[in-house]
Amino acid sequence: MMKKKVLYLHGFASAGSSGTAVQMRSHLYPMGASVLSPDIPVSPLEAMDMLRKMVEEERPDLIVATSMGALYAEQLYGTPRLLVNPSFHMARLLMLRGMGRQEFRNKRADGARDFKVDRPLIAEFQQVEKQSFSHIDAAEKGRVYGLFGLQDKKVNCQPDFKKHYGKDNLILFQGEHYLNGQVLGTVVMPLVEKLLFGE
């Protein structure tokens, strides 16, 4: 029987089948931990609804989230969370350089290959973003870690994290926006192990 459960939330235009999820699963399974990695709905409102229900039902011990996934994870209060290169301003980002048809970078369970970024979708992101950082107390500050790649050219939400969560759990690493095997193995997974199993 699995003792620990991790929920992994992927980034924009990705899927639960991402390489990060696969690597986390193969790393943690021998230690007795399972990794849930759902396809997040394109609609931010649907995504938040689904993820809140999932956390309530599955009760994960830890949430690990990258980029857009970290925007959602930040609002899943009460569970320890690792936010890797969080993208807290998706609406602005997409308005500037993401409008139109987008292809999924990883295989989705429903077979979808692409989706459309339009004004209604951006409006949904704005709605979700208004709820960011809304229930932070001392306990939450201790639960949440922010990991930021020093070579991340896509987003820089360090100031947001610092403002709301402080510097105690802010970690900088050598790496870009998208995780690779080395960063996952040397930066993310040691922290995941520490939070799941202790020192």
Image (tube, rainbow, N blue to C red):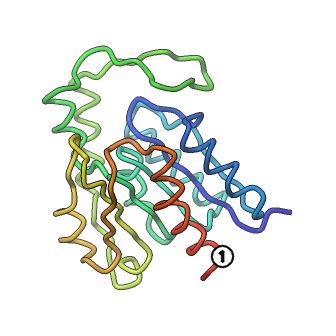
Nearer the observer, 63 or 75: 63
The x, y position of residue 146, in whole percent, is 34, 65
> From the viewer's perspective, is residue 153 above or below residue 32?
above
Residue extending furthest left?
Answer: 96
Task: Write down the quadrant of residue 100 in the picture.
Answer: top left
The residue shown at (16%, 38%) is: 92
Tell me where residue 87 appears, x and y as whole percent.
28, 48
- Residue 40 placement, left or right of 138: right
| Residue located 37% across and 60% down the image | 74
Give the class, few, some or many, for how many residues have Cα within 10 Å of label 1's Cα (few <14, many ≥20). Answer: few
- Give the residue drawn at x 30%, y 58%: 148
Q: Which residue is mark 1?
A: 197
Specify the quadrant of the image occupied by residue 133.
bottom left
Name the residue located 77 percent from the left edge and 68 percent from the top edge.
3
The residue nearer to you, when weighing 70 against 148, is 148
The amino acid at mark 1 is Phe
Q: Position of residue 160 (x, y in %)?
A: 19, 62
